[in-house]
Structures are given as structure tokens and as C-alpha cells.
Amino acid sequence: MTESDGYILIALMVLPLITAVGLMLVPSKERSAIVGITAISSLALFIMSVYVFAAYSFEGDTYQGVLSYPWIENVGLLGDAGISLKVGIDGVTASLVLLTGIVVMPGTWVSWKIQHRLKDFFVLFYILTAGVFGVFVLMDLFFWFLAYETALLPMYLLIAVWGSTRKEYGAMKLMMMLMAGSIPIFAAIFAVFAEVGLGTFDMEILLSASKDEDFQKIFFPLVVIGCGTLGAMFPFHSWSPDGHAAAPTAVSMVHAGVLMKVGAFGIVRIGAQMMPEGAIYWGPALVALGITAALYGAISALRQTDMKLLMGFSSVSHMGYVFVGLGTMNVIGMTGAVLQMTAHGLMTALFFLLIGAMYDQSHNRDLPNFSGLAKQMPIWSVFFVFAALASLGLPGLSGFIAEVHIFIGAFRSYPIVGGLAVLTAAITTTYLMRALAQSFFGEANPKWNSLKEMTWIERSGAAVLAASILLLGLWPSPWIDRIAGSLSQIPGLTL
Amino acid sequence: MTDLSGQLLDFDYSLVLPEIIAVLFAMIVVGADAFKVQLKLPSQIALALTIVGIVCALVSSLTIGLNHDGNFAGLIILDSFTTFFRVLFYGVTLTIVLGSHEYISKYVSHIGEFYGLLILATLGAVLMASAGELLTAYLGIELLSFSLYIAVSLTKGDLRSNEASLKYVLLGGVASASLLYGLSLLYGVSGSTDYSEIAAALSGSVSDLEPTLLLGLVMIIVGLGFKASAVPFHMWTPDAYEGAPIPVTAYLSATSKAATVAILLRWFGGPLLPIAGDWQMIFSALAVATMVVGNLVALQQTNIKRLLAYSSIGQMGYMLMAVVAVGSGYVDIATSGVLVHLAGYIITNILVFVGVTHFFNNEESEEISAFKGLAQTSPYLALLITAGLFSLAGMPLLVGFFTKFILFQAIVSAGHLGLVVVAVVASTVSLYYYLMVIRQMYLYEPEDSSKKLSVTTSGYLTTLVLFIAMVVLGLWGAPLYAVADTAATSLF
């Protein structure tokens, strides 16, 4: 990746912002203009993120496409480097940028049918998108945190105005829990700045600067708690099922698909990469929390009947694997964790897209209310079964690759945890198969004969996500090379 | 002219030109308004003269501030710190007058006196920030307070306004008495009212804790704590805010608070710094109590002005942390941090208040529930108030995020991570009650959706300028930080 590719990284953040501002200037009645603008913007973001992923060379420097513009320096407590608008990616963020690009496009497509204040929806949605891309590409801690909060900010209105099922409660709970989660991150950022004492928020400098071991042991857990809240880590996950059940389709897709990964990524970047000794010290705790979440989420999912709640708890469970992988502190386990972020992001986005496509017609998501859906909506059901198979880790699909890495990593460090993780996979199969058997097969319930097949737009969106799942499942080496290449730079990591 | 010890005093009147202009215009405004019928002056003469006067003061502050440094016979110090606050105070008054003159002519009795008092209050605030000795500072405090006691009562038809004024006067009088007593004790111990001489006298006697000095210190902190509405001296704030005309509430939350911060920094970063060990703990306790109580009590408010009153108490708590950091010897970075935050807070808060003023002009209600469906009846006002509240909560892309970040980082660098954790928790709580207002505007349908609220041209212009400032400084706060840093370095 050349330096000039840094401009594309900047464009990834700025284009959504420009889209949001541009949309504000369009009259609300011009639906076709709104659709056109968002179509072009989301396609451009998709193409750019594919390019960024492809251009990142895993044989080159760890951080590529680095561009830096001084913003504030030599004033007050800031030194020569101060705060700068600095972008750059490593292998981990390259794959997460790609994930975001893939999820945002279908998310935009399925939102076109929103009738109520479409323009306002997209303004907020694209501010959210800008924040998410910002978190992945920014290399300055000040701007990183700014982007992090920007990604959370629109969430409240997006859920409370356009959501369903207890939307006000879900939105407020989600917002307050996530904002409370950013408290320890705030504290950790300030502490890192003061500890390094160079008067700069430049991440490259902060990452490489030496930090006291005791300092790392104190502040690593703060980062885990803060970012873990956004990543729906047990026991800070309780916003997730409620929030997802309340959120509109596209917001669920982006939130479960990408935003939760921002949390897990925070643990990688601000946690493991910034404070490796602290991460090694607290690794066992992270593994314990992760495996608890995996089991707890899976067992809770067993008795859910609302499809979105089922997916919400399933997400808690799958994110549990991510934390197990991160806690192993060996390259293969952590690589698996980042793969799992991508894999889970794609497949939850697909799930929520499908659930949304049906809920918009039936206004009902209760599994026992349905049966024989495969007869009424065959194409929809094919996609759903596909997503379920990816979720339970069928070889050849994305989930398998990620989970295998995590299981191997876990067995290397903590054999018992490895065993429990495999058990969780079995429970996952149970709840997904139970849902499929109950609602998709058997006699068709005549009450739902009026259900129509997905629209072409929804089919295309689902196809993009399904193709990505298949690609990652069948040809994972581009991801693995990039992710493992960057993670192996963390000092103290075992193979 | 010479002082008591025979030293020649240097009365350089050019240094206080903005204040001279302000006094003159305050009198002209009152006079012109009183005789406008006889002299056949246009009805808006008071407004026009006020604007002219403040603009003149503002321009002269800038030109003098950029070219001179010095002091007016030791009474008034002219440095970057003074200039920072001068520009801020005159700017605030100008913005409030421009943004809400329709409200003033509609709901405020005695318009001429009102504008005159506003100018005099600003003058008092400038004196507070620029004084070089205790008595001048005290006169500034009293000038500001007395002008505001009357201004608060100027919606005469409204009982709440009268009640607010009475409460404010009585409690304010007690606080002033306490402050003055404290100052006299301080004078008794140090033998001077001049800041630098007090500092010299006190730095000799750090080791022995003199009871007189301690008593004086506590009295001063009580007096200033009242002016700053620090918990537990905040009880007057919500009532005064609720009863006062909205522009006065805006003024109370901006200039009155900022002037107190200025005097806190001048005193505790200067003459009282040698005895920091005695007051640092007090300010830590005040800051924590103010942040916690202000933000928690705000949760149950139903009146937007009371809500903003408690929110401004909470904001004051953040700024009190800076005084603690000053006590740890980080005068420079703590001051620049708090000045940045102060400027950002004032821009945002005035934006919200001007928005509320125009809402009131249409709906004649201050209840939060009256904001129901504002996103449909006036998308512009709804956007303004939402952005302003988000900025107050420290949300990104807006100035509040940047200023809070800088302020909190300065406090952590001074070694007070614990305080900042309280502050961040408090500011998360604040997001909840701001969201309660935003919820009304965006989530609910208006009672009469065909109704469209109107905003006047001057209202649009003022809010637009403030809004742009809020967004631009949020994304590029470097100039603000540089200015604040220059002001801070001139403090010592």
C-alpha cells in the first residue's frame, strides 16, 4: 500500500460525512434523490474498502497508508507531535474496513423502503458510518475516541425513532450503557497520555513507547470493560438483546455486524497492542469471561422465541468466542478472534436483513407463530438456512475458519476452555436447528400465506453478504495473512 | 498622583478605554430611553445604542489587548488573560442582545434600564477578571451582582421573577458579606490588597497555619462558592434561573459564571497559591459535590430553565476541578484547559438559550413537555437545541467534546485521575437528561402539527454564527486552544 492510498483512508471517513451533509440539503420529499445519493455513496465506500483490503500488503510495514496532518501542537500540555489527523491501517483494521464496506451497502439498500423521515434516517446512518470507518483508520488517540463516540451518538435517535418493540426503552438502555462504557476508555486514554509523557496522542508513538508494567496491569482491565461493553462482553452485554430487538433492520445490521466489532477491536488496539504486558497478565480473566459469555449466550438463546432476541443472545455467544480468542494471547487464537469478528459481522448482518425483510410484512417475529415458512418464502428460507449454517460453523463457510482458529488457540493455552468452546458450538447447533425445524419446515401455517418473497433489493443485499461468507469460508488466506502478520508484532505473544 | 507610601501611580486611561466606553453608553442608553418620547427618538433606540456601545467596547478591547501590556495604577492589570475575558464578556452581551431583543421588548419592562444594567453587569465582570487588587475585584463582583439582582426581577408581571430576585438578593448579600469579611481577614494577615504583595507575604508564612488566615480563606471560598453556584451554595441558582427573563438566565449562566472562574483563577493561581495546601482539599470536595449533585438533581427537572440551571451547576463542577489542578502547581495547563472549556461552554449554552428564547416567543412555555414534536414544527430550532445539548454533554463533532477532552486531560496530567473519573461519570449522567429533552422534540408528535414556529432574521443570524462556531471549533479547536494558552501563560 503506497502513501497515496492514505487519501482513500481519509475518503472512507469523509465521504459518509459529506453524504450526511449533502442529504441535509436535499428536500425530504425528493425520495429518488435520497436513494440515488445513498446508492452512489454506499457503492463508493464498498469499492474503496475492497481496494484498501486488497492493496494492504502483508509483507510490507505493519502500518500502511500512513498520512498525518498536524492539528494542534506545542500548546498547553501538547508537545511537538501533539494531536494530528493521522490515518493508517494494519492487517486487523484492513479486514475490519472491508467488513464495514460490505455491511453498509446492503444496509443502505434495505433502508430505502423506510417511509417515515427517510432523509433524517440516512443523515444519522451515515454519521454512524463515518464514525465506524474513523475508528478503524485513525491513528491518533484523540481522533480515535472522537470517531468512537461519533459512532455511538446517532444510535439513540436511530433506534428510538425508527425502531420497534419497546424502542424507547431499548434505545435509552443501549445509549446509557455504551456511554457508561466509554468512561473507562476515557480514563485509560488520559492515563496512557500522562504515562508516556511525550505530550502526544499519536498512536504509533504511544504504541511503541514503553509503559510501566504495573501501569499496564491497572489500565488494561479498564479498556476491556469499556470496549467490552460495546462488544457485548458478559457481564456488560445486557443492552445487546434489548437494543437489537428494538433497532430498525439496517441499524441492527450495522450495529451487530460492525459496531460490536469496534468494541472488540478497541481491546486489540488500545488493549493488547498498547499494553501487551497487561494483556498477558489479564489474559486468563478475558478467556474466562469469554467462555462464560459463549455458554451463557448460547443457553439463553435456547429459550428465546423472538427471532431478534434469539440473534441478540446468539451474538453475545459468538462475541464470547472473540474474547476467548483475544485472551489466549497466542497468534493463532487472536487471529481467530479477528476472523470471528469478520465472520460474525457478515452473518449477523445477513440474519438481521432477513428478519427485517419478513418482519416488515408480518409484524411478528415470534418463532412459534410460524411453521412451514420454507413453502411460503423459499428464497428467503434458503438464505436463512445458509446464515444458520454459517453461524453454527459449517466447514466451507466463514464461521468454521474463525472458530477452528479460536479452538486451536484455546486448546494450546487452556485445554478445558477449548473443550467448553466446542460444547458451545454444539448448543449453537441445537438452538438454530430447533428454530429451523419449528418455523421453516413442516406444515405451512395458512395465516401467513399472504407473505411475499423478498424484494429484488433485499435479495441482492442478502446475496452480497452470502457471497462474502462463502468467500471467507473457502479462501480465507488473504484475511489470515494480513491479520496474523500484524498481530505477530505484539511483543510477548506465543505462536 | 502617589499612593500611601509615596510611589508615583501611573493612570494610563487608554488601558481602560473599553470600560470607559461601556460606562458612557450605559448612561446614554438609560437616558435616551427615558427621554425618547420628548426627543422623538425611535422606539428601538436603547437597543441600537447598546449594540453600538458594546461593539465599540469590543473593538477597543481587541486593539488595546493586542498592542499593550501593563496596569492601571496597580488596580487593573491588562494582560492576555484580561483581554481573553474582555472579548468573551462583551461578545456574550452582544450575542445575547442580538439573539433575544424580540423577547426583551415583548416581555421585559423598563427596556432602557434593562440594557443599561446589562452593560454595567458586563463592566463588573470585566473588572473581576482584570483587577489587580482585592477591593477592585470586590467592586467588580458587587457591580455584576447588583445589576443582575435588578435584571432578574424585570419581568415584573411574573411572580416567579419577583421571588427569584428577592431570593437572589438576600442570599447574595450574605455571600458578599462573607466574602468581604474573608478579604478583610486576608488583608489583616498579609498587610496588602495587592495580589503580588499578598503572594509575597503569604509565601513567607506557609509553614504555620494561622487560624485567622484559614478563617479568611474559608469565608472567601464560601462567598465565591455562592457566586459560582458550587454545591452546597447553589440553592439560589435554579430559582433565579427559572424566574429571570430568559436572556438574563443566559447571561447568568455565561458571564456571571465565567467571571467567577476568572477571579478564582486570578486569586488561587496568584496571591493564594502559596497556601494551596490549605484550600486544595476544599476545592476537591466542592468540585465533586457540584458535579454529582448538579447532574443528579437535573434528572428530575420538568422546566427547561431549571434543567439548564442544574446543568450549568454541573459544568461549574468540571471547572472547579481546574482550581484543584492549579493548586497542584499546574497553573499553566489547568488554566488553559479551563479557559478552552469555558469558551466552548459559553458558546454552546448561549446557543441553547437563544434557541429556547425563540421557542418561548412562539409557544410561551418553558416546560420540557412543551417541546413535544418540535422537530416537525420547527426543524431548525430542534436541530439547534439538540446539537447544543449534545455539545454540553460532550458529544463528538461539536465543541463540547474537544473542550472537555482538553480540560479533563489537563486535570489528569496534574495528577487527579480520580476527579476526572467522577467528572466523566457525571457527564454520562448528564447525557440522560439532555436526551430527555431531545426525546420530546424528535420522538413525539406535536399537538398541532400544522403549526410552524417562526424565527426572526436576527435570531437566525445569531444562532447560525454560534452553530458554525460550535461545529468548527469542535473539529478544529487549535486556534481557541492557542488563544487560551496565551491567556493562561500571562497569569504568572
Image (cartoon, helix red, strand yellow):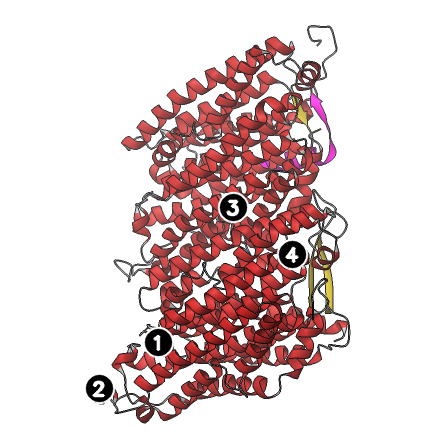
Does residue B31 appear in this view?
no
User: Where, by quadrant of the figure, is residue B481 drawn?
Assistant: top right
Between A1 and A204, which is closer to the camera in this rendering? A204
The subunit carrying tag 1 is A
Q: Disc 1 designates what residue?
A: A307
Q: CA distance from mark 1 to mark 3?
A: 36 Å
Q: Disc 2 designates what residue?
A: A447
Q: Disc 4 designates what residue?
A: A141
In x, y percent, where is residue B217?
Answer: 55, 18
Residue at the outermost front position? A416
Residue at 58 percent across and 60 percent down: it is A284
The subunit carrying tag 4 is A
**The disc labelled 4 sits on which kind of residue?**
Leu
Question: Up-down: is A68 above or below B431?
Answer: below
Dot 1 surroundings within 10 Å: few (below 14), some, or many (20 or more)?
A: many
Q: CA distance from mark 1 to mark 4?
A: 38 Å
